[in-house]
């Protein structure tokens, strides 16, 4: 039997103190002092970097059109204006007028589409972007990343780091604190500090104005995907969550937009981006701020999330919502989030079909792949077959456009061409059935076929930078 002695008591106390430090105090200290994973260290610069000053001073690149695309000059009925004949009033030998500077090239080029990427770390760690570009032999034209309002500051490095690489920045600007996201699905949108009424009431105006001035100072266009997937319930800005009321989303959108307009931040591409429509979603048209407040319409949709486990092609997922959008807006569409699961070995097939189906939708001017692991492994780079399928599809000329800091975002798309109407046939007298003819069907005359109830679709949990 061990005797209780002073040395043994001291040893036990020392062991207890060491365990307390190792398992309690040290983790708390490290958590408080560890650098935030999605924040640049140091003071945010305010001046343009040298590379940007030089790029903005360079001549604008000439506009190009993807091979096979129809340009306005190629449209039926358009003929070039005739060259005016000399009037006799010209002075012989007078110098020709200086050629006007080329207009900024549209992005994407008319008839083309950009292919972008979204990763968890965004500009804070570009290794996944480089890995993706190597695997598919194509550098993304757009990089989407999330910035939450909890950060309370504007840091131009999140944009400049992306733009310096010839990639257009698109920020998912999220009025919430993802650190406080509830683990209970139905409570994910409950953050009273970020209720729509507080945005409308001006409680975030100083922060919004700071961002407006910061974006204005960039000197190049950026896309702002503000408060996305608002037709669901899983974010604090959704009208189905957080005590928000019907109509407040549009009010909040217009309030934020107006503050940017007042600041002169006119190089912003405003991206209104709902989730694909689903049963019990808030109606899209009730959330739309109007064409004067929106530049691009974005959509989130995935193959392989809750409610979409059964195989569905790109068109099967997006086309029903695209048709609804076209009932109230002609704006260009960007698929702002998409990806496919490989749980059934169908990812490569899905990607191949996506590239086959995209050209049938010329109003879709861009697509952003979610290259990360969240609910499942969405990454193209997770399998050689998926990467090969993506590389084959993205090699088409319509995806070859490049973005520069001088690019002009494409804000209009041609209306769909209606199908040709066949010539009217000459009416003929209806054939008279013989007296013995009777209806062969079992449905009584005057009834219609029953309407099948549409399959319900549950929403996905949208990935964020957190």
Image: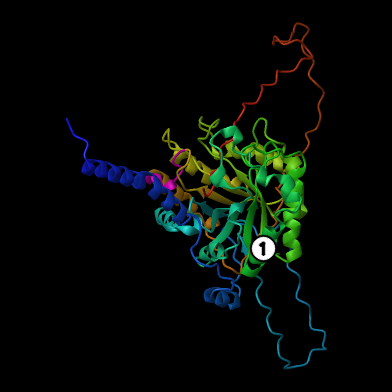
Q: Residue at x 61, y 69 (%)?
A: 406
x then y, percent, for residue 196:
71, 45
Residue at position x 74%, y 59% from top?
259
Left or right: residue 34 compared with residue 144: left
Q: Can you give x and y, in whole percent of width and height, for residue 450 in the image?
A: 70, 18
**SS at circle 1:** helix
Left or right: 289, with 339 as reference point: right
- In magenta stretch: residue 383: yes
Kindly identify which residue carries mark 1. Answer: 210
Q: Nearer the viewer, residue 269 or 331?
A: 269
Which residue is drawn at the image coordinates 47% and 48% (left, top)? Answer: 371
Q: Nearer the viewer, residue 195 or 429?
A: 195
Q: Residue furthest top?
A: 436
Span of residues in magenta: 376-384
Comparing 173 with 242, the one in front is 242
Residue 269 seen by the camera: yes
Q: What coloring was used for the rendering?
A: rainbow
Q: Is residue 207 above or below residue 404?
A: above
Q: Is residue 311 above or below residue 269?
A: above
**Which residue is outermost to the left?**
1
Quadrant where the image shows the N terminus: top left
Let me know if residue 43 is in the magenta part. Answer: no
Work out whether residue 368 or residue 21 is closer to the camera in this orientation and state it. Answer: 21
Where is residue 163 shown, x and y percent of the image?
Answer: 54, 65
> Quarter of the image holding residue 258?
bottom right
Q: Is 70 left, or right, of 1 in this rendering? A: right
User: Does residue 289 show up?
Assistant: no
């Amino acid at each position: 039997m061990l005797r209780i002695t002073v040395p043994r008591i001291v040893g036990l106390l020392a062991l207890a103190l060491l365990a307390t430090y190792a398992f309690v105090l040290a983790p708390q200290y490290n958590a408080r002092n560890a650098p935030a994973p999605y924040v640049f260290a140091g003071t945010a610069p305010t001046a343009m970097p040298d590379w940007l000053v030089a790029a903005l001073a360079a001549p604008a690149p000439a506009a190009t059109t993807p091979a096979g695309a129809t340009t306005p000059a190629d449209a039926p009925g358009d003929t070039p204006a005739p060259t005016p004949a000399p009037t006799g009033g010209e002075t012989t030998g007078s110098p020709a007028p200086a050629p006007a500077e080329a207009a900024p090239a549209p992005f994407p080029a008319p008839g083309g589409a950009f292919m972008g990427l979204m990763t968890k770390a965004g500009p804070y760690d570009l290794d996944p972007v480089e890995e993706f570009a190597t695997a598919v032999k194509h550098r993304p034209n757009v990089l989407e990343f999330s910035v939450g309002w909890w950060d309370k500051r504007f840091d131009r490095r999140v944009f400049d780091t992306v733009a310096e690489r010839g990639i257009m920045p698109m920020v998912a600007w999220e009025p919430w604190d993802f650190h406080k996201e509830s683990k209970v699905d139905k409570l994910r949108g409950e953050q009273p500090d970020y209720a729509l009424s507080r945005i409308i009431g001006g409680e975030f105006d100083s922060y919004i104005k700071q961002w407006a001035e910061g974006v204005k100072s960039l000197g190049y266009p950026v896309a702002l995907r503000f408060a996305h997937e608002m037709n669901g319930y899983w974010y604090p800005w959704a009208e189905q969550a957080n005590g928000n009321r019907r109509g407040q989303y549009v009010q909040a959108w217009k309030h934020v937009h107006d503050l940017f307009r007042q600041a002169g931040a006119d190089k912003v591409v405003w991206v209104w981006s709902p989730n694909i429509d689903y049963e019990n979603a808030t109606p899209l048209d009730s959330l739309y701020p109007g064409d004067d407040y929106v530049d691009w319409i974005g959509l989130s949709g995935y193959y392989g999330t809750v409610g979409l486990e059964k195989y569905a092609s790109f068109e099967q997922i997006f086309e029903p919502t695209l048709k609804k959008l076209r009932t109230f807006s002609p704006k260009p569409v960007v698929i702002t989030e998409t990806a496919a699961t490989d749980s059934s070995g169908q990812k490569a097939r899905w990607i191949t079909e996506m590239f086959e189906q995209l050209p049938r939708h010329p109003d879709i001017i861009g697509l952003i792949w979610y290259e990360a692991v969240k609910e499942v492994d969405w990454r193209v780079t997770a399998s050689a077959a998926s990467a090969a399928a993506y590389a084959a599809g993205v090699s088409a000329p319509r995806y070859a456009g490049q973005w520069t800091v001088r690019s002009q975002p494409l804000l209009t798309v041609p209306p769909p061409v209606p199908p040709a109407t066949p010539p009217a046939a000459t009416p003929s007298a209806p054939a008279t059935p013989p007296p013995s003819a009777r209806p062969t069907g079992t449905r009584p005359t005057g009834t219609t076929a029953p309407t099948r109830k549409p399959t319900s679709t549950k929403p996905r949990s949208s990935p964020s930078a957190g």
